[in-house]
Amino acid sequence: MIDFYYAPTPNGWKIAIMLEECGLEYRTILMRLTTGDQLKPAFLEINPNAKIPAIFDHDGADGPVTVFESGAILLYLAEKTGRFMPADASGRKEMLEWLFWQVGNQGPMAGQLSHFVNYAPKGQGYGHKRYAGEYERNLAVLERRLDGRDYILDDYSIADMIAFPWVFIAKPLGVSLDPFPNTAAWRARIKARQAVQRAINLYKDEQNRGEQNASNNNILFNQNAKHVLEKRN
Ligand SMILES: N[C@@H](CCC(=O)N[C@@H](CS)C(=O)NCC(=O)O)C(=O)O
């Protein structure tokens, strides 16, 4: 059994997709990020970075084990199941490149764009412009990679699962996929999968649709070192 620490956000969906694709037995622990579940001492033992997603696998190869960071979790689950990752060395190298690209580039830039579109106080023109540009730059990187390919690697893999969620919400982020036809087709191909449908619908009603924002919530927004160092029980 896997305990899955989750909220219905792009980073949460990445892992929900893999759990659903693999048919792994899991129990979802819904994390209420706006009230600070991620900052509780018991959760910091699981993810010292105080964010979802994270897992606690009761049946790890060497006993119970925790894993945090979406890229590390996807890799862990792919290795545990032997699924959705290339078997050969050059395929594995490419998979790592695209996982690291996502967690170091597409993810953070999209996350900041989402912040400026949905949660920042109004009048943050430069922040919005900067991250919209970076988000679109990363779409262009993906667009070139998908030229003549159905998936990021030769077959559907964790590289697609990690990159899909932030492309899935391009429109609400205010970005059209019209200039990125390969990416739009890839998005539709992945969205059509039954497992992906189940994942993006997991606790959909609990999504923060902007009602909680940087003007009215200092737990999720305006964070600093104190949020992690303070003990919240
Ligand atoms: N690099 C992390 C990013 C995770 C992340 O940013 N999670 C957000 C939700 S999408 C979160 O838990 N935010 C809570 C907070 O910042 O307090 C990953 O890929 O797992």
Image: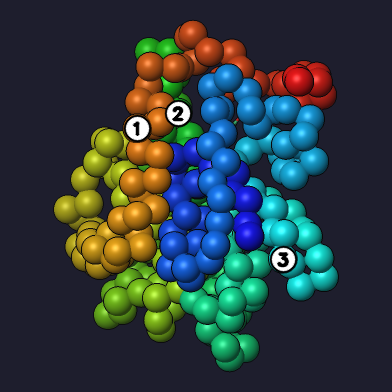
Q: Is residue 49 visible?
A: yes
Residue 138 position, x and y percent, is 41, 54
Point out the residue furthest to the left here.
178
| Residue lying at 57% horizontally and 41% vertically, measured from the top left | 29
* Ligand 1 located in image quadrant: top right
Q: Which mark is residue 115?
A: 2
Label 3, on which residue? 59
Residue 216 position, x and y percent, is 49, 8
Considering the image in quadrants, where does the N terminus appear? bottom right
Kindly check if marks 1 and 2 are in contact, taking CB atoms under 8 A apart as contact: no
Point out the residue furthest to the top here.
216
For disc 3, the neighbor class at 10 Å (few under 14, some 14 to 19, many from 20) is few
Q: Is residue 2 left or right of residue 9?
A: right
- Circle 2 SS class: helix
For disc 2, the neighbor class at 10 Å (few under 14, some 14 to 19, many from 20) is many
Q: Nearer the viewer, mark 1 or mark 2?
A: 1
Q: Is residue 14 above or below residue 97?
A: above
Residues 98 and 16: in front is 16
| Residue lying at 45% horizontally and 28% vertically, measured from the top left | 115
Q: Which mark is residue 13?
A: none
Residue 75 position, x and y percent, is 62, 68
Label 1, on which residue? 205
Kindly check if marks 3 and 2 are in contact, taking CB atoms under 8 A apart as contact: no
Q: Is residue 202 above or below residue 32?
A: below
Q: Amino acid at mark 1?
A: Asp
The mark that comes first in sequence, 1 or 3, is 3
